[in-house]
């Protein structure tokens, strides 16, 4: 078995205690664990984790992430290119991306030590930002890509095209393009549907639409989408997974499609998306 990588969010409460328990567990079984300190995996750095942890590449069987959904999103997005399964240990609130809670941790770590685990492949979105003929950025998203207004309460307009066919002009606070994984995130809060995360599609959900029509639209994962911003001098922001932000200008275009890159999220034999959904939402 290759090494196991452990990437904690050291800013989370009790992260030190959880890391110590995980470290002791694998030491007792003589399984080598590589632990990223706060300098090796700086979540506030603009440098990707793939660059920060490049000495780990090709050495890992599994990556364990200790933190909330935001931590897991960052790790999954930055290290998707390594094609290594990711297991989340939840130190956050709802924790839809984390497979296990701290209270259940030891039982599931035993499955890991015994190599009794599988993984689900989660689709990602790729967004390309164009300003005229210039490409300003290329982004990967596991959860969602959002075009929304800035801090002032003024309506923005975003035109949406599917496979070059005009679909809708959305007026309101913006628009969310979510993967099935991201359907339980911002899209859900905006009234979008919950989608089984193994499906190959994405969901278009308007944010506070200035219209009686406010329904989400589900799009085939093989389709291509284009968004054109009509800001009319209102501040508009592109946000990727709630973590990467870029200020947009009038007539900017964002093309969105399914990425060839995937994320592998660890799961176990008794995993059920619908049971997990019930447990997370019942509170």
Image: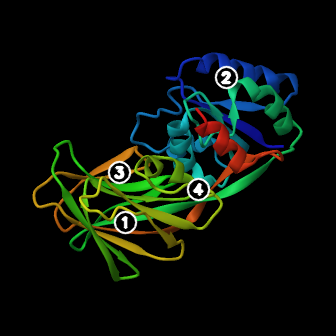
Residue sitting at x 66%, y 55%? 83
Image spot of residue 19 (x, y percent):
67, 22
Residue to which mark 2 is pinned: 19
Label 4: which secondary element: helix
Rendered view: 112 above or below 273: above
Residue to which mark 1 is pinned: 128
Rendered view: 169 above or below 59: below
Using the numbered discs, state the Cα–Cα distance from disc 2 to disc 3 in whole angstroms. 31 Å
Residue lying at the far front of the rendered structure: 212
Q: Nearer the viewer, mark 1 or mark 4?
A: 1
Q: Is residue 59 visible?
A: no
Residue to which mark 4 is pinned: 81
In the rendered structure, find residue 239 and report the number of the disc placed on it. 3
Image spot of residue 97 (x, y percent):
60, 43
Marks 1,4: beta carbons within 8 A: no
Left or right, residue 270 beside residue 40: right
Comes first in the chain, label 2 or label 4: 2
Left or right, residue 186 beside residue 147: right
Label 3: which secondary element: strand
Comes first in the chain, label 4 or label 3: 4
Comes first in the chain, label 2 or label 1: 2
């Amino acid at each position: 078995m290759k090494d196991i990588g452990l990437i904690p969010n050291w800013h989370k409460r009790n992260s030190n205690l959880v890391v110590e328990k995980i470290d002791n567990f694998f030491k007792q079984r003589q399984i080598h664990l590589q632990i990223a300190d706060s300098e090796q995996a700086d979540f506030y750095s603009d440098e990707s984790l793939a660059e920060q942890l490049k000495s780990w590449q090709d050495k890992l069987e599994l990556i364990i992430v200790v933190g909330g959904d935001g931590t897991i999103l960052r790790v999954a997005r930055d290290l998707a290119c390594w094609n290594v399964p990711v297991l989340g240990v939840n130190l956050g609130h709802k924790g839809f991306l984390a497979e296990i809670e701290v209270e259940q941790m030891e039982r599931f770590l035993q499955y890991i030590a015994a190599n009794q685990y599988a993984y689900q492949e989660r689709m990602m979105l790729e967004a390309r930002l164009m300003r005229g003929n210039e490409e300003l950025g290329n982004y990967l998203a596991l959860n969602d890509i959002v075009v929304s207004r800035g801090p002032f309460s003024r309506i923005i307009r975003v035109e949406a095209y599917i496979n070059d066919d005009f679909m809708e002009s959305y007026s309101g606070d913006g628009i969310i393009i979510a993967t099935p994984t991201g359907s339980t995130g911002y899209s859900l809060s905006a009234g979008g549907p919950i989608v089984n995360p193994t499906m190959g599609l994405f969901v278009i959900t308007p944010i506070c639409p200035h219209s009686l029509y406010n329904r989400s639209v589900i799009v085939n994962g093989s389709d291509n989408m284009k968004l054109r911003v009509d800001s009319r001098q209102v501040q508009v922001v592109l946000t990727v997974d709630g973590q990467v932000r870029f200020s947009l200008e009038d007539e900017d275009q964002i093309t969105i499609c399914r990425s060839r890159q995937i994320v592998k999220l660890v799961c176990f034999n008794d995993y059920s998306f619908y049971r997990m959904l019930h447990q997370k939402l019942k509170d």
